[in-house]
Image: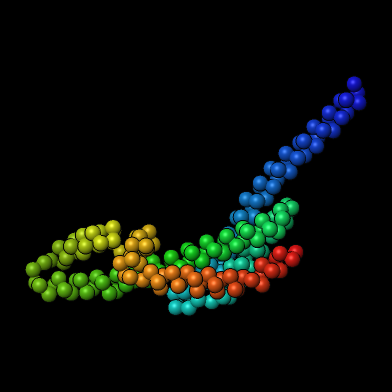
Amino acid sequence: MERFENNYTSYSDEYNDLNLFKESSGVTLVKGILGAVVGAIPGFLLWLLIARLGYVSAYCGLLIAAGSVYGYSFMTKKGDLSPAIGFVICTLVLVVSVIIAVRVDWAWEFAKFFDEEIYPEFLSEMQGYGLFTNAEIEEAYKESLKELYGFEEATFANCFKNLSTLVEYADAKFDYTMDYVISGACGLFGAGVTYTKFIKK
């Protein structure tokens, strides 16, 4: 009987340790994802800054990758997740960062275009008729935007949310797609060395 109780206690301890390990792995995974995301932020912000200047740099992809790998490694150093999991997480962070960066850049460009080109041209044309007040022109402009694009004000947020519609109306699908391809290629190229070193660890 005593032997049975000892064996039961041993199996119970192993079962509890196994449950503790599983819980620990889940916590480590969440911490790794958060670390990868936070670590990628500096490179993401630099990417946006350079994109606003009209350039795409592989170094930004390298910085995003290095930051996500460092953040992931720092947050998971007490766990034992496989490098393959880290590779997948950091790659997803890079891909999502590129997608968001391209969308943000295009939304900025559209908002700027509406503010500096479309609205002044619309205002000038309507004022030329000499039949409308500025308030009426403003209302007509909002109605025109809503009818064509689904929003009344061409803010960054509205342009970001309705980006697909704007790209379609601007007949810029090819340029938009190529921006993704070029940005993604630069990001993956810049991240290659970092990921290779990460896999070897």
Residue at image point 29% right, 70% down:
114
Quadrant showing the C terminus: bottom right
Quarter-wise, where is residue 128 in the image?
bottom left
* In the image: residue 119, left or right of residue 15: left
**Where does residue 118 sit, x and y in percent of width and height?**
26, 72
Quarter-wise, where is residue 85 in the image?
bottom right
- Relative vertical location of residue 9 with respect to residue 85 in this rendering, above or below: above
- Is residue 74 among the parts visible in the rendering? no
**Where does residue 174 sit, x and y in percent of width and height?**
40, 72
* In the image: residue 136, left or right of residue 13: left
Residue at image point 77% right, 39% down:
17
Quadrant showing the N terminus: top right
**How many labels, in total?**
0
Residue at image point 88% right, 28% down:
6
- Relative vertical location of residue 6 with respect to residue 129 in this rendering, above or below: above
Which residue is most to the front? 174
**Where does residue 64 sit, x and y in percent of width and height?**
58, 67
Q: How is the image coloured?
A: rainbow
**Where does residue 70 sit, x and y in percent of width and height?**
66, 64
